[in-house]
Every structure is written in structure tokens, then in C-alpha cells.
Image (cartoon, rainbow, N blue to C red):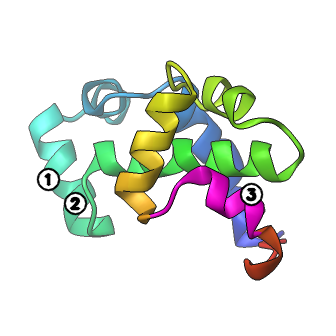
Amino acid sequence: MEAGHSRRPIQRQLRTTYRTVKQLADVAGMSARNFARIFVQETGVAFRSYVLWLRLNVAIERSMAGGSWTEAAHEAGFADSAHLSRTFKRMFGINPATLTRDRDRFPDPA
């Protein structure tokens, strides 16, 4: 099994069930503060930023599969497409529409 496929259930779980450090720390039997510290130490990124990155990837996958950015925003847990667009631009430096328009310039992750 490819690493990308084995991560998908974990990523979906983080996106839907464990949205806060406290929730995941409780599962791990740790304090939220200690869990957050270890998470950053092991991954190099804050938990909240990682979950946001996962949500953006869900939106990208939905859009690349033919969905609208509004559908992608809702599926990824954003309030609306404007919220997704602001977050997308802040994280990646481009608007989501640029990705759709120039999709042939970006490699297929599969």
C-alpha cells in the first residue's frame, strides 16, 4: 500500500473528528500542551496549521475531481468559498481559481 493511501484515513479522521489539539491529546492520554509540543517537535508544524493544510487538500481534491470551489469549501469544512479563497491564498499564495484555470501546469498527485 502506498504511503499516501495509508495516510488518507488518518487525514480524514483529523479533518472530521479530531479538530483540536485537546481532542487528540485526550485520545493519546496527554495534556494538550504536551501533545502540541511533541507534535511540532515531530512534524515541524503546529497541529492547527497541519489540520488546515489537510482541509485545503480535501478542497483541492474535490475541485480537481470536477466539483465547484463552493462544493469543495463545504466538503472541507469552510463556511463558504470566500473563506476557502482567503485561506488558500494565505497558505499557497494563489487563488483557487488559478489552480483550476492552470490545472494542466500542475502534476497529477496520483
Q: Are marks 3 and 1 in contact (CB under 8 Å)?
A: no
Judging by the rendered image, the residue that carries numbered circle 1 is 37
Magenta span contains residue 110: no
Classify mark 1: helix, strand or loop: helix
Residue placed at 60% from the left, 52% from the top?
96
Mark 3: amino acid: Thr
Give, as a single range, the part of the protein colored magenta.
94-102
Q: Quadrant of residue 104?
A: bottom right
Q: In the image, is residue 107 above or below residue 73? A: below
Residue 7 at x, y = what percent? 65, 56
Mark 2: amino acid: Val
Q: In the image, is residue 109 above or below residue 39? A: below
Residue placed at 41% from the left, 28% from the top?
19
Judging by the rendered image, the residue that carries numbered circle 2 is 40
**Neighbour tally class for label 1: few under 14, some 14-19, many 20 plus, Cα within 10 Å:** some
- State which quarter of the image contains the N terminus: bottom right
Classify mark 3: helix, strand or loop: helix
Mark 1: amino acid: Arg
Query: Can residue 31 be seen in the rendering of this structure?
Result: no
Query: Can residue 96 be seen in the rendering of this structure?
Result: yes
Judging by the rendered image, the residue that carries numbered circle 3 is 100
Q: Are marks 2 and 1 in contact (CB under 8 Å)?
A: yes
Camera-near label (3 vs 2) is 3
